[in-house]
Amino acid sequence: SSLYGIDAWGHGLVNVLPDGNIGLSDPLNREAEPVSLPEIVRDLKDRGIATPIQLRVQSFLDYGLHRLCAAFGETIEQVGYKGVYRGVFPIKVNQQSEVVSRLVEVGQQYGYGLEAGSKPELIVALAQPLAKDSLIICNGVKDDEFIRLAILSRKLGFNTVIVLESLKEFEIVRRVSDEIGVKPMLGVRVKLTQTVTGKWEASSGDRSSFGLGTYEVVQLIDRLTETGFLDCLVLQHNHLGSQVPNVIDVRRTVTEATRFFVELRKMGVPLEYLDLGGGLGIDYTGENNSTDNSVNYSVEEYCTAIVETVGYAMDEAGLPHPTIVTESGRFVTALSSMLIFDVLDATYYDVPDKPAPREGDHHYMSDLVAVEGYLEPRRVQECYNDAVYYRDEIRALFRRGVVDLRQMGRAERAFLYTLARIAQVNREHPSSGDLDAQLEAYVDYYHCNFSLFQSLPDVWAIDQIHPVIPLQRHDEAPTRRAILTDITCDSDGKISHFVLEDGLHKALPVHDLRDDEDYLIGVFFVGAYQETLGDLHNLFGDANVVTIALDGEGGFSVEHETEGDSIAEVLSYVEYDPQDCLAAFRKRVDGAVARRDLSADERRVLISAYKDSLAGYTYFE
Ligand code: PLP
């Protein structure tokens, strides 16, 4: 476990069992027996649920929500803050019905609400049995229909807040509200001038795309006063960004947010809620520092930074403590699920046997083969330089027609053989120069049964790092290092950043593949953003999604299963009619039968192969 740094990034949820398999531990029942992950996958396979599988663990999801709400609750008590915390879940972070309804159910005790950034998300929110004092926060661009629904929902007892993103939006609100005779609950999204660091720097500061600048805020207050809507403005919204790596940024930006809050209260705005948006990050790498995929704080420190800052500012201004709202979706859901896939095949970079030069081979071939003869720890960089030089010269000779294909093949193989020996000496006697970095390029490719674009879109789009580990054989030292390639025909479809105990690496330590074993790999903490941001590249559809509950005795139960897309479903997403495809194929087959190119038997086999594929999983089966 130490090689992969599981103790650092595993959040106590992932661990190594005595038999070398990866186990999952229940964070809400630490005494309980861990469950073997490869066992879970085998059991699911027996039930007909194939890899790739997106596996969600119910208690991991519950844990995220409990931790957030408990941390705010405890901090509020410790600091003597006189207001309360009312979190909302931003639906965009994981829209799956099962996730949203579970969070609503578990969140009842905390008055936990929802954030809707679009009309469809509002429709989802209005169908949930939210607790009486929970909020629905409406962000994003809103049309007449969106606003009408939001205002009308107040009649049903929902605390739906329309967060104004522009002055123009208020004019729609005013018109609709006058028409239906119901006053809205309003919020205003204020752009802070300070930015936060990290990947989402652009969503903070005065150049961010959403919200009102200072002058526009003043204009809005004047307009609300003129039209008699000032009483409706109860919430100030400031989104700090996502995955904020440094807690100092939270203190800085919240301090500025409180300045706006205090000034607005001084202008007579009856603000009750301070909504600080998203930002609470996850330590994906276990580094506990302020780099992009880590955070230098705990959830408790994050809460303290907010609660203390708001409390002090309000005390100084002589104002009551507002209800604190945050929209932390990543923190709540990220840990809850993992992607599990099998390795289908491997391309090994090294070769076990050295080809001997043949009669008539160019002398560079013998030079290349001779490198191994003077390989020793002191000369390892020299050997690497020579091998690359001779290999490149032979490639140049091939391009000029001097060396033929067979000789070139032997040379490439001799190069890989030599390189593997160099890498071995370098591992045993690490050198200080550039060699480590140079050798990192020469690793195996493990070809895996998943689509990066469908299941891990942020790994592709923004170099997100998730912990990735083999799920078995942790009692056996891995002998290889591999980049994981996916099943799409796109060279971008690969994972080549891994977190290990001693930092980030470009290859993952893995074991040799065995014929009698499904070699399983898990990508952890993919519960936030990954499920619906993905796309249909190469027409690979949704993976199978399974939610399990851990039973506390080393077993589990399947709570929910959503079968992944079939090929027919994926085809219909891109406007093919699967029946038309089948009819066209059948016509072609019948033509071949009529010409006697195919027998009746062959016709049956062909048609049923096509039909089976249409109905089947898009992944390797
Ligand atoms: N609220 C708003 C307005 C957002 O734009 C986002 C996403 O960036 C969030 C909340 C979610 O933030 P987080 O990624 O911290 O869960």
Image: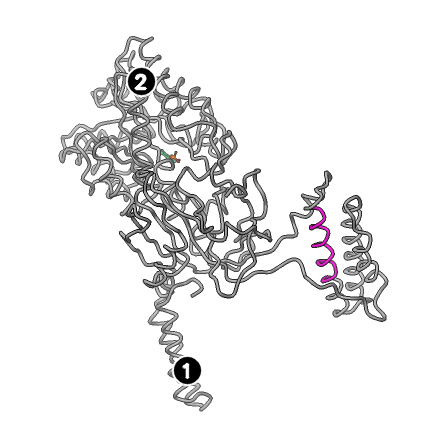
Q: Which residues are magenta?
A: 412-426
Nearer to the camera, 301 or 573: 301
Q: Is residue 161 magenta?
A: no
Q: Circles 1 and 2: CB distance less than 8 Å? A: no
- 423 left or right, relative to 618: right
Q: Is 58 above or below relative to 473?
A: above
Report the mark closest to the observer, 1 or 2.
Answer: 2
Mark 1 neighbour class, 10 Å CA radius: few under 14, some 14 to 19, many 20 or more: many
Q: Percent from the top left, x then y, of residue 5?
A: 51, 40
- 232 left or right, relative to 312: left
Most common secondary structure along the magenta stretch: helix
Residue 78's label in the rendered image is 2
Q: Residue furthest front?
A: 18
Q: Quadrant of the C terminus?
A: bottom left
Question: Does the image show residue 619?
Answer: yes
Residue beneath disc 1: 589
